Amino acid sequence: MPTGEQRGGGRALPDGQPCLRASPLEALDSVGAVLSCRRGQELYRRSDAADHWYRVVSGLAKEQALLPDGRHQIVDFLLPGDCFGFGTRDQHQFAAEAVVNGTVVIAYPRREIEMLAERDPSFAMLICQLAIATMSRSQARTLTLGRTRAPEKVGSFILEMAERMADRQADAVTLPMSRYDIADYLGLSVETVSRCLTKLKCRGAIRLTDTRCVRILALADLDLG
Amino acid sequence: MPTGEQRGGGRALPDGQPCLRASPLEALDSVGAVLSCRRGQELYRRSDAADHWYRVVSGLAKEQALLPDGRHQIVDFLLPGDCFGFGTRDQHQFAAEAVVNGTVVIAYPRREIEMLAERDPSFAMLICQLAIATMSRSQARTLTLGRTRAPEKVGSFILEMAERMADRQADAVTLPMSRYDIADYLGLSVETVSRCLTKLKCRGAIRLTDTRCVRILALADLDLG
DNA sequence: CGTAGTCTTGAGTATCCTCAACGAGGGTGG
DNA sequence: CCACCCTCGTTGAGGATACTCAAGACTACG
């Protein structure tokens, strides 16, 4: 399955969005397959064999759940440095695809990961921290999804992206994804996301330099207020 | 911190609800402190030092997020065999407390866990699977929280509990928690939970033997329908 | 320059929440 | 033993939030 043109497998790509954090999976870069993806390109589907783990080098990917009637929910956005595709079962629970053109992802054979983890306890611990970090992210999101109003959802989304992308300063973010993706991430309709953004803008909490570029003016108004 | 009367530290307590699954943390039972808790008894609060991991032996516990204005969201229900309290940071992200009287929990020092994991790679892998399992559970919940109607939420909650408790047969569950807890778990109001249950009952999907005892009649009507 | 997808705004509606009331246990104290 | 209180659970009425349907402006891309 893993095919794609070669490209720098390490971290720090000077152009585009480089991978900021160190990832334990980098130790396996020699056996990883580099994938360069177009927007919408699928990495795997819902019941595909989960025989690879993935790491985002640049760009943006998403993991999403699909319902038979067409509804879909984005489970996680994957930014440069993030790893995904691991689960307890042998089949993927969700589907995954690239969100922007030129997204570079590395696929690591699961067997290689397990073998290295068996040999190297400190590597196993790093894998463990990876899973725990993903878990914490997911758990923090249950609060946003369950107990907040739409403007709070959008506000905390902006804050989350500002923190995770660390876009130079933390007071400005360029959102790489569409309003539709934001809606599917927050469990809202596209229209509501749009309305909330204009509402936050009128309220003076944010400024929209561009459609996708958000400048945070009043941090307190976004932080669950 | 961990104090409490002694009681069978292993698995399989013949009375009450026994621990069904094997847990890697059991390897550390010799250094674990057994806690017997009353309903509502706190195990830790939001910014407490995260120097212990926990395992539920019997009863039921919950991990919940609290907002300053009083809203709260249950992040996870912890059933016998489940482990919790682990995160990436040194402080707990959520609060945890017992849901029913007589809940027995074991607290393991985090340092001991890390030391054992450093020595024993297979133990580290088990810990890893623990984190991944919790992550999968949390991610599956984002779909329910984000993209389903209230009756679907309640339906999938019944199914989740039926599966996780494995209450003899899978077609009957005795819910140990109150309607308020169910509401806080699903991001609904108590009234809506109650109304959805009566609606599911009228629809012929479930039967309520007791207030807390649910018999599943039409599985398809609960499975996101 | 045309087309397809994205984004925004408006109007009407459905879902769910809030407020309120009431009945049913369960524990406590007189 | 019974009265009392408290929490839990259910149901109803009204209202707020967010969705659906619809239309139009803007952008990217071929």
Image (spheres, coloured by chain):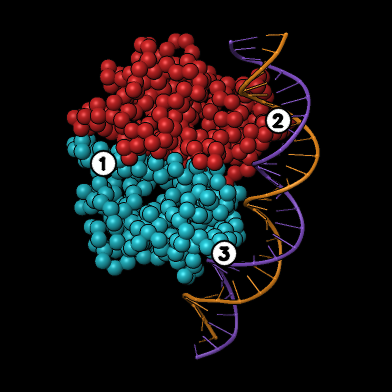
Chain colours: A red, B cyan, C orange, D purple
Placement of the N terminus of chain A among the 4 image quadrants: top left
| Above or below, B207 relative to B64 | below
Q: Give the residue type at disc 2.
A: Thr
Q: Position of residue B200 (x, y in %)?
A: 54, 60
Helix, strand or loop status at disc 1: helix
Residue behind mark 2: A198
Q: Give the residue type at disc 3.
A: Cys
**Residue B126: assigned label:** 1
CA–CA distance between discs 3 and 2?
43 Å
Residue behind mark 3: B202
Disc 2 is attached to a residue of which chain?
A
Whether tag 1 and tag 3 are in contact, CB under 8 A, the answer is no
Residue toward you, B213 or B50: B213
* Residue A193 seen in this snapshot: no
| Label 3 CA crowd tier, 10 Å (few <14, some 14–19, many 20+) | few
The residue shown at (28%, 21%) is A28
Placement of the C terminus of chain A among the 4 image quadrants: top right
Q: Position of residue B112 (x, y in %)?
A: 25, 43
* Residue B53 seen in this snapshot: yes
Marks 1 and 3 share the same chain: yes
Helix, strand or loop status at disc 2: helix
The residue shown at (47%, 22%) is A41
Q: Give the residue type at disc 1.
A: Leu
Helix, strand or loop status at disc 3: helix
Residue toward you, B104 or A78: A78
Disc 3 versus disc 2: nearer the observer: 3
